[in-house]
Amino acid sequence: MDVVNIASGLGFIRRAVTLVYSATEAALHSYTQALRHHLRDTAVHVFEVAPPSVDTAMNASSSTQEKRPYVGIAPAEFATAALQALRENHLMAPIGLTAELHQASRGDKATFVFGQLNAC
């Protein structure tokens, strides 16, 4: 048995205009790390897949409300990348632009990227 949590890049570096969403995604990221550690000596693998913005009606409408151009990957592209990451046993699988947020959250770039995401 495996556990697959679908997270968000905003769990790595928060966006102030999506405060609650970012906080819940950060909590999911933290929970996934702790669960993975807790189950490390079992046969259970705990995966975290973090897609970028995916081209769905929900994401397109939120982009319109924020008056910014919408950029998202196709659902099939996300699914292909996610399944490949799972097949290759990547426990942490940030996909597309989310990989950049994940990398930035792991060092000195975090403050810079936080500022960029929250520039108004």
Image (tube, grey):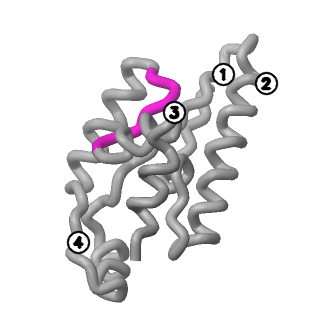
State if disc 3 and disc 4 touch (CB < 8 Å): no
Number of the front mark, 2 or 1: 2
Q: Quadrant of the N terminus?
A: top right
The x and y percentages for residue 30 are 69, 42
Name the residue that disc number 4 marks.
70
Q: Give the range drawn in magenta.
A: 90-96
Q: Label 2 amino acid?
A: His
Q: Of the residues under marks 2 and 4, which one precedes in the sequence?
A: 2
Name the residue that disc number 2 marks.
38
Q: Of the residues under marks 1 and 3, which one precedes in the sequence?
A: 1
Report whether 65 appears left or right of 1: left
The image quarter containing residue 57 is bottom left
Number of the front mark, 4 or 1: 4
Q: Label 3 amino acid?
A: Gly
Q: Which mark is residue 24?
A: none
Give the Cα separation between the discs numbered 3 and 2. 25 Å
Other residues around mark 1 within 10 Å, as few (<14) / some (14–19) / many (≥20):
few
- SS for tag 1? loop
Q: Which mark is residue 44?
A: 1
The x and y percentages for residue 34 are 74, 32
Other residues around mark 2 within 10 Å, as few (<14) / some (14–19) / many (≥20):
few
Q: Give me the residue at 21% from left, 46% from top.
A: 77
